[in-house]
Image (cartoon, helix red, strand yellow):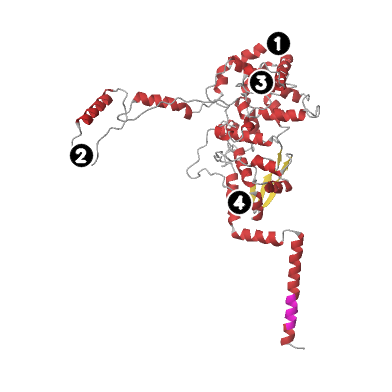
Amino acid sequence: MKRGSYSTAKDDGSSHIADHGDPSEDPGDPPKEIEEKMEESSTSMTSNSGAEGIEGFDRQLLDDFKSGFRPLFVRDPTTTIYAVPERIYKLKPKIYDDRFQYFGIVMDFDEFYPRSSLSTLHMLAHMQSILSRNGKNTFEDYLSAMEQMRDRISECYLGEIRVDFKCLIALVLSCCHILDVLLLFFEGKLTPQVDQRCSTALHELRTDMLLVQSQISFFALQKIYNMLDLDHSVYPFLMDLSLHFFKEFFQFNQLVDPMPSDQIHHLLHLVHYHLLPPNYFLKQQGSKSSFLSRCLEFPISIPSPSKQPRTISPIPCARRLRDAGIKLKKKKTIGFSNITFHRGVLEIPYLHVDNYTEVLLRNLIAWEQCHPNVGAYFTGYGIFMDFIINTAEDVEILNRLGILEQTLGSEEEVASVFNGLSTNIFYVEHENDLLPSVCEELNKYCQDKFNIWKANLINDYFGNPWAIISVVAAIVLLFLTATQTFFSAFAYFRPP
């Protein structure tokens, strides 16, 4: 989905303030002109049948005004595909744009069709591959199936998007492209082991499939996949087929409850859900929630007055945390924000940083910023990492401890990936988010003077082996000096 401009109609209103004269004059009876205007205004309001409730209000004008702003506040529950908010998009536009492929229905079809670019040829080749898998169906059959779901497809997009004939063609092409890639990968015909040149292509495909603005409704993919009439004793269902493709690049939580296919919005939603902790949508009280509520369609939880939502407090960077005596440690378990702090030890899960990390992380955050009821798991993680990584020195510390592993080439490039992740981001605490508590405990620990003194002692006198040897030597020398002084004084007062 390419970015578009949204326009809202605004009525220009004007208000007139009557001249009541100089207030310093005698406030007697109003002048004749003002009295006539007041009588006309009173007559107008009385004769206006639309004036109800508040005296002087034009009911028709009020209804017209309300009808104009209602769509801005009432979110359609069927909306699942969004343009990235401008406040986020403007920071790094290339992160959210479809760079290599044409996924989504809102593309420049007139520009796409006559071109012979490599991406266009790839899409048409995948289209032909899908047609060859089931000779019974033609391109027109797939197009007709999408035509029958036109209204449902239109409802998935935020804003008024006209799904015309060209959009449907683009949708069919995109669906066939994605499905053929998933099937080829499952069949072992599209792997780096088969062709070393495929490694980069697979990463690019994976990234483009997970861009917020390029999403395709899962039910559209499901419809065409069902029309292929594959043998499911050999080929898995579409959800499992998709997870098989993405699990080569992500460490999914194996304990996550499976999501019903009719609850999946699109591929980004599917990947986001399987990267969450298995109990992320369970209530903290320990009561089991329904299966449906764990599939991202639970009601919006309204915090009780006794527990107000918190934000993530700013924390020092990795170098300052280390200087404050906090021990940074690689966490054994997986999970982006499975971060814990206990007794001066901050455990952070391992993360491999490559050319696609920033794109994936920012689009996961953008998805949480756009869609309700999906939590703030990656939003919190992005904010936290933005806090602890300020410079290349912070990256070097995390890299040395095994928390980060990067293939970008320099620590400065890695720092640029995380710097700014919290800019223009709104964080709304989910009831199972632990990062606000972790940040509060970190700040308390850093503000404790005893912890600072202890850290300074360790850093100054026990920071390296030579310092330790010097301290030990000084202690031994002090002990010998004290012993010599004692025996000298003892001999003076108690001569032999």
Q: Which residues are magenta?
A: 481-488
On residue 67, the disc is none
Sooner in the amino-acid sequence: mark 4 or mark 1: 1
- As for residue 482 lying within the magenta part, the answer is yes
Image quadrant where residue 355 sits = top right
Q: Is residue 97 visible?
A: yes
Which secondary structure, mark 4?
helix
Q: Is residue 243 above or below residue 342?
A: above
Residue 27 is tagged as 2
Of labels 2 and 4, the one closer to you? 2
Residue ID for mark 3 = 175
Whole-percent x and y of residue 54? 32, 30
Quadrant in which the C terminus appears:
bottom right
Mark 3 falls on what kind of element?
helix
Of mark 2 and mark 4, the one earlier in the sequence is 2
Amino acid type at image mark 3 = Cys
Calculate the distance from the C-alpha at mark 2 to the C-alpha at mark 3: 77 Å
Residue position marked by numbered label 1 in the rendering: 136
Q: CA distance from mark 4 to mark 1?
A: 63 Å
